[in-house]
């Protein structure tokens, strides 16, 4: 395959390899919390972590970071597994659940207590906050900071046994209340939560906090490079402090996993926060987690976006150390680029207008041949029936042509793609002046692929579907979910004090359902078959609503960016 461009993480791994730090071993992980469906941002992280494992012949673990009992569900675990597989990545035997490490984590906490590096605090959360200090002021010690090791061990064991109420006690790391890094001011590492966990049930009533659990998970799995987003940069000193303390206590060998931060994906015209995605689904602004407009990976799949397109996108945007915004067009263009190559061509008339060829025999028909892919002759041609009555696009006819209009108008000649050259002779209108039928005469010696075809030089080249052979089907024209690049953010010209909600910025035209006329061969499309409908864009047979012989099509993307200014 193509050589992935270099980035600062690859440079760092190369340095480690030159220094012999891991004997060439590269082991990364993708650690989703199973509290929602994966989104486009996760795809960046998946492509990065699994991509590094592929590039260095290493391994990438799929690890469910399920240490928080309240919001996690098995439904999400299944959805995440399906999405990572769909993107085409393979974790081999490396599928893990952080909740399997609860006992080890507990033992690690006990070791910290033994080493005088953790204590049981009886302050309330508010009291702790009050003593934590600020960026400019050091914190103050808790009155419980100097309990004896024995007392701490006893209390912690009784916390585990369920003797205390939620919030009454917490285990804190004992580091430095005066540290300039607030994350090192004795962070809480265990709390009491009398909540059932989706995998461990009622086995535990104390749960580790993420910042304590995550480094331990990495160390247990012998991760070499633990890649996370920039907001964890301030946590890195604690990550290192904790693993160092646990290495000292004999829990883990050195070298220890290294945390590396990269910039998360920020994409215009969508929201990538689970909280906002949940709100869109729960309040019915979209049609469930797999709505093709939603930036979830199951939504992307129904939209017709492809794993190859996501990989191309990830490669293109690269990996950096500073936050920036990526324009939605970069993602769409990546999809177009893959689909242009991968999708066979078909014909669909989305806004049908009847064209009658007055000199073509009534009831007669014949076959035209259309190439399945202009760049891949090996994909062959298919038959398209042709007859006296055809459907063309309403916008391809003008009774009085505008300047530069080269399509159908009375007196003009155009080619019906893969068929004949026709000359327009007139049209019918209804009482409101709306065009109901267009008339033309065809040139019998002009059929595409025959020697006479070359004698005709025309500017217009229209697509069409035979009225007698085509069929009608539901087509959904999807567009961007939000009408503005930064949903919910103030815009130039906003009155002072105006607050916007991302919900106000939903694009009212993000979904239009139409009945189109499709060429007969599309009837046989299977769910998830992708096509370019000529002159219109890329479409996919919906994987949820299509039935045998009756596919429903979703527009993945128009052929060109219609949002570019
Ligand atoms: P949210 O904050 O919306 O709940 P999250 O980041 O907590 O999402 P996780 O399930 O913890 O979601 O994420 C799993 C992995 O995906 C993490 O390593 C995280 O860094 C990465 N990730 C999440 N969002 C993005 C993003 N926008 N760009 C790149 N990576 C991301
Ligand atoms: Mg998270
Ligand atoms: Mg998060």
Image (tube, rainbow, N blue to C red):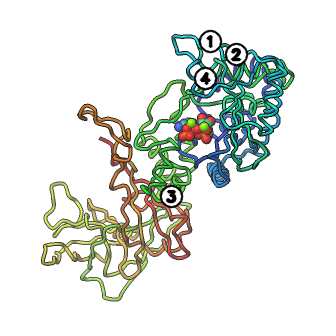
Tag of residue 378: none
Mark 1 or 4, closer to the camera: 4
Label 3 and label 4: CA atoms lie apart by 40 Å
**Quarter of the figure that contains the N terminus:** top right
What residue is shown with label 1?
179
Q: Is mark 4 within 8 Å of ligand 3?
A: no
Q: Residues within 10 Å of mark 1 (few under 14, many from 20)?
A: some
Q: Against 529, is 17 above or below? A: above
For marks 3 and 2, the one nearer the N-term is 2
Splitting the image into four quadrants, where does ligand 3 fall? top right
Q: Is residue 110 rendered to the left or right of residue 313?
A: right
What residue is shown with label 4?
128
> Residue at the location (65% across, 14% down)?
141
Q: Against 457, is 33 above or below? A: above
What residue is shown with label 3?
288
Q: Residues within 10 Å of mark 4 (few under 14, many from 20)?
A: some
Marks 1,2: beta carbons within 8 A:
yes
Q: Is mark 3 within 8 Å of ligand 1?
A: no
What residue is shown with label 2?
175
Q: Is residue 44 visible?
A: no
Q: Is mark 2 within 8 Å of ligand 2?
A: no
Label 4 and label 2: CA atoms lie apart by 15 Å
Q: Nearer the viewer, residue 257 or 533?
A: 257
For marks 4 and 2, the one nearer the N-term is 4
Label 1 and label 2: CA atoms lie apart by 8 Å
Say which element carries label 1. Answer: loop
Q: Residues within 10 Å of mark 2 (few under 14, many from 20)?
A: some
């Amino acid at each position: 395959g193509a050589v992935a461009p270099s980035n600062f993480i690859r440079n760092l791994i190369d340095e480690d390899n030159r220094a012999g730090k891991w004997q060439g071993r590269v082991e990364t992980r993708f650690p989703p919390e199973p509290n929602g469906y994966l989104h486009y941002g996760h795809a960046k992280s998946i492509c990065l972590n699994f991509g590094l494992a592929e590039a260095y012949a290493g391994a990438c673990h799929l690890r469910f970071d399920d240490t928080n009992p309240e919001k996690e569900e098995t439904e999400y675990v299944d959805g995440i597994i399906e999405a990572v597989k769909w993107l085409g990545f393979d974790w081999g035997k490396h599928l893990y659940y952080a909740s399997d490490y609860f006992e080890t984590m507990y033992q690690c906490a006990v070791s910290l207590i033994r080493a005088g590096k953790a204590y049981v605090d009886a302050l309330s959360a508010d009291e702790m906050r009050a003593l934590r200090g600020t960026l400019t002021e050091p914190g103050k010690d808790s009155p419980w900071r100097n309990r004896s090791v024995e007392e701490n061990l006893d209390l912690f064991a009784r916390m585990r046994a369920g003797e205390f109420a939620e919030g009454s006690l917490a285990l804190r790391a004992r580091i430095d209340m005066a540290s300039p890094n607030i994350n090192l001011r004795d962070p809480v590492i265990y709390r009491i939560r009398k909540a059932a966990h989706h995998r461990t049930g009622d086995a535990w009533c104390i749960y580790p906090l993420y910042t304590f659990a995550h480094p331990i998970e990495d160390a247990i799995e012998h991760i070499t490079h633990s890649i996370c987003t920039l907001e964890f940069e301030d946590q890195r000193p604690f990550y290192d402090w904790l693993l160092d303390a646990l290495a000292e206590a004999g829990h883990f060998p050195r070298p220890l996993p290294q945390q590396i931060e990269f910039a998360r994906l920020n994409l215009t015209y969508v929201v990538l926060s689970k909280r906002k995605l949940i709100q869109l689904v729960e309040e019915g602004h979209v049609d469930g987690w797999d709505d093709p407009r939603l930036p979830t990976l199951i939504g992307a799949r129904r939209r017709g976006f492809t794993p190859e397109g996501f990989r191309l996108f990830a490669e293109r945007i690269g990996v950096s150390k500073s936050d920036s915004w990526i324009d939605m067009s970069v993602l769409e263009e990546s999809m177009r680029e893959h689909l242009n190559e991968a999708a066979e061509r078909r014909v669909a008339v989305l806004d049908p207008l009847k064209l009658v060829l007055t000199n073509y025999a009534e009831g007669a028909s014949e076959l035209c041949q259309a190439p399945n892919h202009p760049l891949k002759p090996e994909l062959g041609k298919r038959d398209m029936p042709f007859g006296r009555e055809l459907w063309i696009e309403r916008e391809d006819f003008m009774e009085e042509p505008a300047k530069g209009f080269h399509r159908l108008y009375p007196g003009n000649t155009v080619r019906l793609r893969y068929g004949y050259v026709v000359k327009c002779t007139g049209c019918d209108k209804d009482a409101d002046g709306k065009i109901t039928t267009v008339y033309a005469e065809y040139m019998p010696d002009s059929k595409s692929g025959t020697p006479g075809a070359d004698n005709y030089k025309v500017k217009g080249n229209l697509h069409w579907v035979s009225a007698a052979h085509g069929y009608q089907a539901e087509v959904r024209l999807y567009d961007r979910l939000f009408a503005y690049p930064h949903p919910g953010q103030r815009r130039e010209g906003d009155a002072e004090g105006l607050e916007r909600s991302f919900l106000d910025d939903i694009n009212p035209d993000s979904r239009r359902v139409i009945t189109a006329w499709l060429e007969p061969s599309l009837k046989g499309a299977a769910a998830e078959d992708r096509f370019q409908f000529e002159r219109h864009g890329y479409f996919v047979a919906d994987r949820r609503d299509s039935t045998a012989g009756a596919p429903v099509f979703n527009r993945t993307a128009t052929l060109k960016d219609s949002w570019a200014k």
